[in-house]
Image: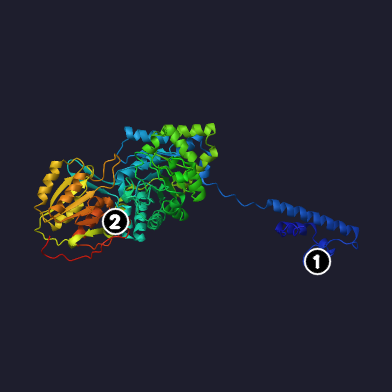
Amino acid sequence: MTERLGIHAGPMIRALTVALFPLGAAACGLFSGSGTPTPPDESRSPEASEVARTLDAALDSVAILEVAADPLPAPEPRSWALRTLDEMTVAEKAGQLIMPWVLGDFAPEGSASHDRVLTYIEESGIGGLVMSVGTPFEVAAKLNDLQRHSRIPLLVGADLETGAGFRMRGAIHMPGTIDLGGATDFPTLMAVGATGQERLAYEMGRITALEARSVGIHVPFAPVLDVNNNPDNPIINVRSFGGDATSVSKMGLAFIRGVQENGAIATGKHFPGHGDTEVDSHVALPVIRHDRARMDSVELRPFQDAIDAGMGAIMTAHISVPSLNGGITEPSTLSPLVLTNVLRDQMGFDGIIFTDAMDMNAISRQHDASEAAVRAIEAGADVILMPASVEEAIKGIVEAVQSGRISEVRLDRSVLRMLESKEGLGLHEDRLVPIEAIPQQVGIPAHIAVADRIAQSSITLLKNDGELIPLAGTRTARVMSVSYRRTSDVLAGRFFNGVLRGTYPRLTTVELDVETSDEAYASVLRGARDNALVVVSTYVTAVSYSGSVAVPDELVDFIEQLRRIGVPHVVVSFGNPYLISAFPDVRAYMLAWNGSEASQRAAAKALLGQAEIVGRSPTQIPPLFEIGAGLMIPRKVQAAGGR
């Protein structure tokens, strides 16, 4: 009966009942007053009992029909990512895991650089691109063009550690120095750490995401979560928030929220922690000898906190950590124990794992492009960035699947992460960006103001013998500004000297680099004797990829000579904060953390007393300064007289 089936008689059943038994059912007492059928009893006539059995059978039959007729809940539609995965061949799946490098320059159709990338897209079916330098308009136009050529939307990443301006702001030297402007260029992450303000880290992440998405970039490869606790680190240095794991974690989480709440995928790097190394992985394989307890408490902590907070991606480090890898000296990028056992299983990360660039020497010296890609996938990585050969990397993955070395299920897992990320970003519905909107979204004054605020709040004064700073700013004073820079850094000192010249019209500027001769140094020192003040600015980090030292002995000797001959002087580091260990007796030492326009202007204003100095060092500078060091100097109104 209907009650026994757990349903109620519907209109169809009731109508059928009335039609079959318009009077007889009630007349024969087959239904009680409540409408519930009553079973036949022995007192009924044979005819009445037969009618009751017939009615029971009819109602049961109709009820069963009604149950069968009820529509089942409609199955959830399969996602775009799953439908796309179902239609892909093994070769197409392998292509999705490859992201080669592309320059953001103007490359017309038919040019070699344009056709090279087009071949990767149309023939190799790559999953995305790593965008390099270019102006915002060039990058956006190029990516729109390449997206139109791709059957599946491309996922685009870029190193945007100091905002979109890290890749999309530049200058041209032909023959004069012309600043082309571009996206917002923030100070380095260590400058953000020096402010001590998580709100500013969030704002930096927010603006980075907004400007990146405006030009078609979806994955800023940022923030750096390495704890830079080694002053001799040749590659991380001011790219890190600092030397304390707790502070790096707090600042990193704020930056990540800013990125991911504004439409992009944050990428913590370089797992499992590149901060305590003395070798550049672009050149060779660094090895970290710390035990697991130390790794958990320092290097891994910011990553674990970021994973717990929902960070979308992680980039591997081409470093070896034997304590995480069973005692074996092997790049973490190629280690199943590091990427699968530690990162996936123990730390619970389920986002995208990007390799660092696979053409770096720490990898490319050991394995060809094919074997390196296969080993990275075996280890647990999802996406191969910048392989030495796109074709060989894809071929290696396909052959590994065909031979059973990598299961297709394992391959599918990584491909699905890529496809789901694209779907989550809405690329399956709209992969292009409106070029006309860029001037309203990229490098706008409101964003530049945040960069200026970070820069000004980050200026850190570590030494100020004789209260040299703030400078009095006498307009008739003779002042020399000496800039030591990389030969390619054509904007080094430009904005800093511009502010200084507004106060010191007689300012003399000198540029030094690695090629400056001993005779030139001697000439500069002779000229320094006639000045009331010499400001030495260094625009370097640690070492270059070629292995050259941060500053040469000649510059160190020049600074020492200024002290010996009694010329008042101050050194401003627009990069590596640890340089003071080479000239500890310097008269005054200020940290501006990087050579961005914002930091150059902020440093000059701080020297002149036009802005207060409030920064605190987020890193230890042994043996002279601990974390938190910094002299607080209030803003002063300039007075006549003095230097």
Q: Secondary structure at mark 1?
A: loop
Amino acid tagged 1: Ser
Q: Secondary structure at mark 2?
A: helix
Judge by depth and name the residue closer to the eye, 349 or 114.
349
Image quadrant containing the C terminus: bottom left
In the rendered image, which residue does mark 1 sit on?
32
Judge by depth and name the residue closer to the eye, 187 or 228.
228
- Asked if residue 606 lies left or right of residue 251, the reply is left
Report whether residue 425 is seen. Answer: no
Above or below 92: residue 347: below
Image coordinates of residue 504 in percent, x first then y, are 12, 57
Amino acid tagged 2: Ala
Above or below 431: residue 204: below
In the rendered image, which residue does mark 2 sit on?
451
Image coordinates of residue 26 in percent, x first then y, are 82, 64
> Quadrant of residue 121 in the image?
top left
- Asked if residue 290 lies left or right of residue 459, the reply is right
Image label count: 2
